[in-house]
Amino acid sequence: MDNKEVDIPTKYDPKSVEAGRYQQWLDQGLFKPSGDKEAKPYSIVIPPPNVTGKLHLGHAWDTTLQDILIRQKRMQGFDTLWLPGMDHAGIATQAKVEAKLREEGITRYDLGRENFIKEVWKWKDEYADTIHQQWAKMGLSLDYARERFTLDEGLSKAVRKVFVTLYQKGLIYRGEYIINWDPQARTALSDIEVEHQDDEGAFYHVKYYFADSDVTFNGKKYIEIATTRPETMFGDVAVAVNPSDERYKELVGKEVVLPLQGRHLPIIADQYVDPEFGTGMVKITPAHDPNDFLVGNRHNLERINTMNDDASMNANAGKYEGMDRFEARKAMVKDLEDQDFMLNIEPIVHSVGHSERTGVQVESRLSTQWFVKMDELSKLALDNQKTDNKVNFVPERFNHTFDQWMENAHDWVISRQLWWGHQIPAWYNKQTGETFVGESAPEDIENWEQDPDVLDTWFSSALWPFSTMGWPDEEAADYKRYFPTSVLVTGYDIIFFWVSRMIFQSLEFTGQRPFKDVLMHGLIRAEDGRKMSKSLGNGIDPMDVIDKYGADALRWFLSNGSTAGQDVRFSYTKMDAAWNFINKIWNASRYVIMNLGGLEKPVLPATEDRNLSDRWILDRLNETVKQVTNLFDTYDFGEAGRALYSFIWDDFCDWYIEMSKEVLNGDDEAAKANTQNILAYVLDQTLRLLHPIMPFVTEKIWLSMPHDGQSLVTAAYPEAKDDLVDPKAREDMASLIELIKAVRNIRSEANAPMSSSVDLLIKTDDKHLIDIFNENREYIDRFCHPAQFEIGANIDVPELSMSSVITDAEVYIPLAELVNLDEEAARLKKEVIKYQNEVNRVEKKLSNERFVDNAPDDVVEAERAKKIDYQSKLEATEDRLKVIRGIK
C-alpha cells in the first residue's frame, strides 16, 4: 500500500481534491488509447467547439456525457480514443474579430486579407488556450496528442479532396441564385443559418398606374399592389396574377408603370400567385425574392439587383443610391405619399429572417455562389437508414426528424464571402475566364486567380469523424482502427447543421456511417425554463459553478438530470444537493478507511462466514452494477444516477454502514475482519462505478484505500457476478428493514425519541420471519431499542398500543400513556385507505388481459404477490382499527 494517499480530511473540499489531479493523469499518459490490438476499439470525436469564446453550460453537459462513456469503456478494457479538436467557425469567428477591430476604429479592409487572417489566428490561439483550461477543469479524459483543428493542413487536404470529387461528379456547381445574405458580414448564409423573429412592419398599398391611359380596372386607372419592402420596388420587372383568377383575365398582357421611376412592367399569369391572399396581384422582383426568382426564370424576366453587398442602395435605385436600405424605405414612402402613389399604410407584425451570427436582418439577394446538389446525397442517406448500417438515433424519434429534413433538403449554398476559412479550390483564368477546380493550383499560376470566397464552416466539420482520423489516407492507422466512431453526443438543435451532413458525406466518401449511435441531448435552460442568453442576462459560466461546488458536483448534476432528448433546467438547489451527495460519499468513505485497520487488499469472506447484512449488501451491489452497466449502454444516465444514489445513500450508508458499527464495536475479531473486507470491497466497487461520473473525488478516495492499481482511470470496471446474487438475503433483509422502519414510524407518531427504550411485540405465525428477527436481534436492539422483545403467534397485546402492519406480521408498541385513541384511529383509517388503493390498483392491472398476456411471467407473478401482501395488510389494519374503535 505504498501508493496510498492517506489524508482524508473531515470535510469534503473540492478545490483541494481536484488540485493538480488532472495534470497527474496527463503526466501518466492515462488518456491515450491502450494500444491493445486484442481489445475492441471504442472511439468518440468531440463535437469541436467554436474558437469564438468560452465554453458554456451546454458544452459542459455535452462533454460530460462523452467523458462518462469514454471513462467507463476504458475501465471495461476497450481500446478507447476520445479525440479532441476545435472548429474555426468561419462567420462566427470573423464576426467576433471584426467587432473587436471596429472598437479600435478599423475594418478588415483597412488591414487587407493577409493581415486580417493573422489577427484571427491570434484570436484563435487565445481562445483555444481558454478552452484547454476549461476542458482540464472539467476533467475531460481527452487524448491531446491527436487534437485537430478544422484548418489543420490534414483537414484542409480532406476538404479539397471532397470538393474536387463532388465537383467532378457534378454534385458541386456554381450558379446565380437567390440566397440569404448577411449585409453586415457581407456573406451568403444557408437557410439554417437564418433565425426568424417577429418584427414590426407594414403593408404599403401602392398605386401602379396602367401604361395605357385608356385602360381601367374597376373604374380606376391603376391597380393596387401591397408590399412590405418598398425599397426593392426599383427591382420590379412584372406584376403577376393567377391564371385561373377570373377577375384579372382581361389584364394579362397589359402593362403598368413602376411608381417613382416610370419603367413599364408587364402583367403576367403564374400559378405561384395565391388569388386568396390580399388583392391576388403581386409584384415580381426576381433579384430580391426567392419565389419571384423562380417566376422570373419561368417567364425569362430580367433580374435587377438594387442593393450593394452592405444593403445600401446601388445605381439601379436612382436618386436613392448610397442610402441604407431602411433609410431608402423611409424616403421612398415619403415620395410615394407626396406624389399620390400611396393608398394606405397598414401596420403589421411579421416573421423576418435575421442572421444567426450577426443578428442583422437578412436580405434575399441575387448572387453567384457555389452549391452542393442535394438530391443524390439525400437519397444516399435516406436509403442507408433502411439498412443494418443505419445510424441509430437516441431517442429514436429524432430519426424521423432526420428523415424529414433530408427528404426536403434544398441545394446547399457552400460559398461564403469571408476571409477566414478554407478558400475554395477553384481558379479563374485571367484571359479566358475558364474555371479550374483542383486540389492544388494550376501550374501557370500567374495566369490564374483563385476564387476569393471560403467554404461554409459546416463543409469542413461535416468531414470531422473521418478527416480527423487521417482520411483521405485510407491506410492511416487511426482511420483503420477507430473509424467509424462509436457514438456522437450532441444537441438536438444541430441535426440539420451538422449531424445530417456528416452522415451523407461519410456515406459518400467512406461508404460507412460516421458513427453507430447519435445521442441527442437537449438544451440547458435557466431555472425558470427560459433559454440562457446574453441578452436576458441569465447565462451561467460552468467554471464559476466548478469554483463553488467542484467539477464532480457539476458533472453529477449534468448526468443525473439527463433524459435523452430533453432540456434540463439549471438549478443551484440541485447543485447544493449534488455537493451534499458527494459529501455523504466522502464521509462514508472516511468512516470505512478509518476502520480498515491494516487491511492490505479486500478479500471477500466465504459465503458461510457472511452474515445477513453482508450477503444483502453484496447482492444489492451486484444488482446496482448490473443496472448501471445496462443503463449506461442505453445512454440512460439519469436512471443510472438514481440507481447509484439509492444504493449509496440508502443501502450502503443508511443501512450497511450503520449495521457494520455493531460488528466493528464488538469483540468477535473474525466477524470484524469479515466486515472490514466487505466494507473495503463494496466501497472499492462503488468508487469504480462512480468514477466515470465524478472522477476527481473517487480517485482521491480510492488512492487512500488498499488496492493493487495506480489509478481508477485504468482500473477494471465492476462486473456482475452470479455468486453474489442472493434472493433470500434480499427478502430477509427487506423484512428486517420493514420492521425497523415500522418501529421508527410508530415512535415518530407517538413522539417517543429513539434513545428511549420501549417494549416491542411482534405478532406472527411465520416461522421463517421469527427466525430472521431472532437471528438478527443485535440489529433490532441497535435500531429499535426494545426494553422487552417478544415475538410469536400468541402474544398478549395491550389494547392501548400503537401498531403497524408489515408483511406477514403485526408490530405493536405498548405506549398507553402516549396513545391518543382518536389520533391512532385516524392514522389507521389512512392506512386502510392506502392499502385499499393499492389492492384496487393491482386488481385493475391484473384484470387487464393485455397486461397479463403480454407482460413477462415474473412481472405478472410479482403483481399477484403484491396483491396478496396488500390484501393481508389491509385486513390486519382493519382488524386493528376495529379494536381501537372498540376501546373508544
Image (cartoon, grey):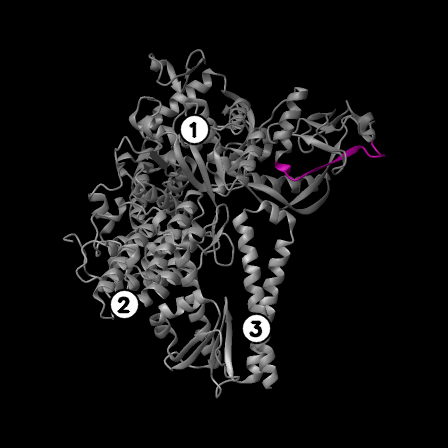
Q: Position of residue 474 (x, y in %)?
A: 34, 22
Q: Position of residue 287 (x, y in %)?
A: 60, 28
Q: Is residue 68 left or right of residue 589?
A: right
Q: Determine the secondary structure under disc 1.
A: strand
Of residues 634 and 119, the one drawn nearer to the viewer in this rendering: 634
Q: Is residue 451 visible?
A: no
Magenta part of the protein: which range?
Answer: 217-231
Q: Amino acid at mark 2?
A: Val
Using the rendered view, name the quadrant where residue 147 is placed: top left
Q: Amino acid at mark 1?
A: Leu
Residue at the (33%, 22%) spot, across then down: 473
* Mark 2 vs 1, N-terminal side: 1
Q: Amino acid at mark 3?
A: Thr
User: Residue reaching furthest left?
Assistant: 2
Query: How many badges with numbers are in the image?
Result: 3
Circles 3 and 1: CB distance less than 8 Å?
A: no
Which labelled disc corresponds to residue 455?
A: 1
* Cα distance in 3D space between marks 2 and 3: 36 Å
Of residues 547 and 279, the one drawn nearer to the viewer in this rendering: 547
Q: Determine the secondary structure under disc 2.
A: helix
Which residue position holds label 2? 663
User: Residue reaching furthest right?
Assistant: 219
Foreground mark, 3 or 1, reads: 3
* Mark 3 vs 1, N-terminal side: 1
Is residue 592 shown above or below 429?
below
Q: Is residue 435 visible?
A: yes
* Cα distance in 3D space between marks 2 and 1: 71 Å
Using the rendered view, name the quadrant where residue 443 is placed: top left
Q: Is residue 122 left or right of residue 212?
A: left
Which residue position holds label 3? 877
Query: Can residue 535 be found in the magenta stretch?
Result: no
